[in-house]
Image (cartoon, helix red, strand yellow):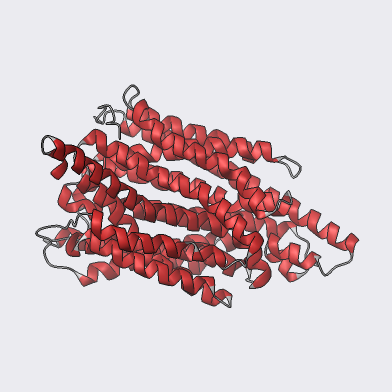
Amino acid sequence: MDGQETGGVVDRAGTRDWAALGVLVLPVLLISVDMTVLGFALPYLSEDLAPTGAEQLWIVDIYSFVLAGLLVLMGSVGDRIGRRRLLLSGAALFGAASVFAAFAASPAMLIAARALLGVGGATLMPSTLSLIRTIFADPAQRRLAIAVWGSGFSGGMALGPVVGGWLLEHFWWGSVFLVNVPVMAVLLVVGPLLLPEAADPAPGRFDLLSAVLSLATVLPVVYGIKDLAKHGLGSAPLAAIGLGLAVGAAFVHRQRMLADPMIDLRLFARREFSVSIVTNMLGVFAMTGLLLLIPQYLQLVLGMPPLTAALWMLPMTLAGVAGSLLVTRLARHVPVPRLIGAGLLLAAVGFALVAVLGGGAGPGIVVSALVLVGFGVPLSEVLTNDLIVSTAPPERAGSAAAISETGFELGGALGTAVLGSVAMAIYHSGVPVGAPDAARETLGGAVGAARGLPPEEAGALLDTAAEAFVSGMRISAVAGTVLLVLTAAQAVLLLRKVRTDTSPAVPV
């Protein structure tokens, strides 16, 4: 790398490297903005487009499903055609799909737009992490770079609700998608100037069947789990999960047979790689489910306007930035496995606070819980991502990053589907059968239905709906608490003998 030369060239190249990191943070920032903004826009979507409960969940999670299904393919494509080229192509598609989503006139159109956003996002995520692996060869610098990259997620969570809340108070709900367009424009202009091109010099033959099998593995499994969480045991979801697992077995077998596999399965033989993937996925699973429910609680149960609710969530995202950056210093003195476990246990305490929430709990308790979750999960993810990218050889950086992001996005999709569906099922059972259909579907639908009722009936309906929503949120939080404790335990136990770099982070 140019930054390893001597004299003044070191300073100039080093500055260019950190400027390139700033460019790579843009897609991360944008995707986290998109995730949090949608949560605040859900009440407005429910009133305007009148989606059913199933359509609302698809609006939220179709993005993650498509993205998770395509990440492995896109990681392999990036290794072959160049990760910068893939990143810029994805930026153009993401911007165009954002415009489509902003002007969607029906739930079906919005679901289709979100699916296109998933295709674009699948090209962005593996490219950013793999380019960090290419740019920063020094382990200490790489860990700091990953911490900055990870703080982009938390920064986006802070920026998204504030910007989105302001937009929702002044414009229509579709405006929250248009914030993606100028960010993508900046990436398209600056990216070619600062980002190096990186690719596998000998990628071998591309296997189309492997690409089809990878997609056919993820989608049926995710669909089946989503349907199980919503409707309980049934032949259709079990058949979908079985089909996905069977295709997955065929995919793994084919990768073992190919001279140039899409995924190098030898990476999973490294404990630090496989355990880090699982830990990332489960941590995101829990946090995403919480982020789907809390904005609705603040707005529809406590009655906050969008911007006020966004400001109450701001401490969580600032805690995430602090956790991502502080961990580089803590890793100099504390073993990495213990830090990962400590971060997840802090998040578990936050979930436990949510689990004891009552309908009358003020925002102070919510903020305390969110700060613990926002600090703990990103802290652990910086370290696991560092283990993932440092394990892979440079020529496989795109594939390794894609596997990491697949686990991340699959965890997010499953968190939304499973915890969201559990909360929705409890909500549905808590609203009387005689209530309006829209009120039985979603809490936002109950708010809309109450506007057409006499005051006494409206008040009774809103009280019942709010109580049912809080019950569902509490049960989901209990599940998240247990999951995070178990995830922390397996990470500490399985990584305790792994040797990790503890060099001090190089200051920017």
Residue 360, compared with residue 247, is above or below; it is: above
In-image side of 369 versus 427 (left or right): left
Q: Pick out the residue farthest to the top.
A: 333
Q: Tell me the quarter of the image containing the C terminus.
A: top left
Q: Which x, y percent locates residue 42? A: 61, 62
Q: Position of residue 375 (x, y in %)?
A: 49, 36
The answer to whether 303 is drawn above or below residue 336 in the figure is below
**Quadrant in which the N terminus is drawn:** top left
Q: Residue at x 57, y 36 (%)?
A: 350
Q: Residue at x 41, y 55 (%)?
A: 409
Q: Quadrant of residue 435?
A: bottom right
Q: Is residue 241 visible?
A: no
Q: Along the horizontal axis of the image, is 299 left or right of 227?
A: right
| Direction from residue 455 to residue 195 in the image, left or right | left
Q: Which picture quadrant has residue 233? A: bottom right
Instruction: Tell which residue pokes out farthest to the front in this image.
Output: 8
Left or right: 3, with 298 as reference point = left
What percent of the width, then of the height, locates residue 123? 32, 62
Q: Residue at x 50, y 46 (%)?
A: 286
- Residue 313 on image: x %, y %: 59, 44
Q: How many marks?
A: 0
